[in-house]
Image (cartoon, rainbow, N blue to C red):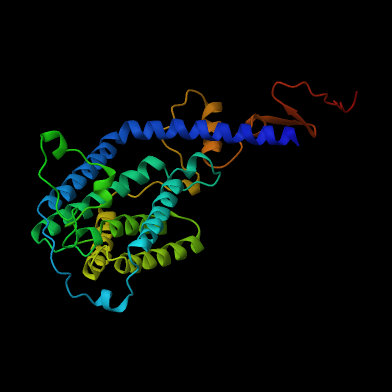
Amino acid sequence: MSFYIGREASKIWKRFCAEVVTEINLLAENWKYILGGLICQYIHGLAARGVHYIHRPGPILQDVGFFLLPELGQERAYISETVFTFIFLSFVLWTFSPFIVKSKKIYTVLIWCRVLAFLVACQFLRIITFYSTQLPGPNYHCREGSKLATLPRPDNVLKAFLIVPRGVLYGCGDLIFSSHMIFSLVFVRTYNKYGTQKFVKQCAWLIVVIQSLLIIASRKHYTVDVVVAWYTVNLVVFFIDKKLPELPDRSNGATILLPLTNNKTKEENHKLLNGNSGDSADWRPRTQINGKIMEEGNVVHVEAVINGA
């Protein structure tokens, strides 16, 4: 039993190392897109913080969703954040699954290049939208009488460019359209295209619908913020996905960018990256002589039958 566990652990380690080599090569070629996407996430955060400075609390607008869905209250407002965290972490874990699992379909670096492209495009539209018109926030900390409804002017330049987690959770003014829905819909649509489990895809769409209702019930957004996110994000992802080059499908055995120096290493890494063991016994050449199998590097007795001797 211990021998079997040790052998499987060795296979997993080899598979992990081979995947690391592949992803490093991909990152070396695509680091500009990853870095650009992360910088745009920071810019989006600054924009959301900037609109908080000019937010003015006021009466909550009339909203159909508020009329139909009962208010969860401040003590249960964490429910929608919990659902969003589950979606976010589940997707991140899935994108890094090629480092562990045998059956692979995606490359981690390439899938994140694609996801960041979708996010940046949607967030660019979102910034334009919520700076065009500032609505009074329906969230509890954004209402009249709350000290957090409007941010005080920053004392220095450093504070103006500093984003703190508390500011992300207690922002006001960045309403149309929902940032939570942008991330959730981009993640679910990406898994819907590149994921392999049909049941998980169906559950993912159901969870996003539930999250939409929870956001409204928590009074974190108006119904229009969620509705606009649904059709805007789907349209943006649809059109950008048509423009981007398609990702190589690993399920058919394709591998790319392996820094190899000989045929043996190439074949071993090919098997490791596509779910095979990569054990040396799998690639060792064999020759058949008079019905006996002779392996390279081993001495095998062969009976020679000489007719007429």
Q: In this picture, is 215 found above or below 262?
A: below
Q: In this picture, is 88 found above or below 42?
A: below
Image label count: 0
Q: Image check: 218 left or right of 207?
A: left
| Snapshot quadrant of residue 157 | top left
Residue at x 30% of width, y 60% of height: 181
Residue at x 56% of width, y 37% of height: 271
Position in image of residue 21 (x %, y %):
45, 30
Position in image of residue 29 (x %, y %):
31, 33
Viewer-nearest residue: 84 or 284: 84
Residue at x 71% of width, y 30% of height: 287
What is the quadrant of the C terminus in the image? Answer: top right
What is the quadrant of the N terminus in the image? Answer: top right
Viewer-nearest residue: 282 or 134: 134
Q: Image check: 108 left or right of 227?
A: right
Position in image of residue 134 (x %, y %):
11, 60
Position in image of residue 192 (x %, y %):
41, 59
Residue at x 48% of width, y 60% of height: 200
Q: Residue furthest right?
A: 309
| Snapshot quadrant of residue 113 | top left
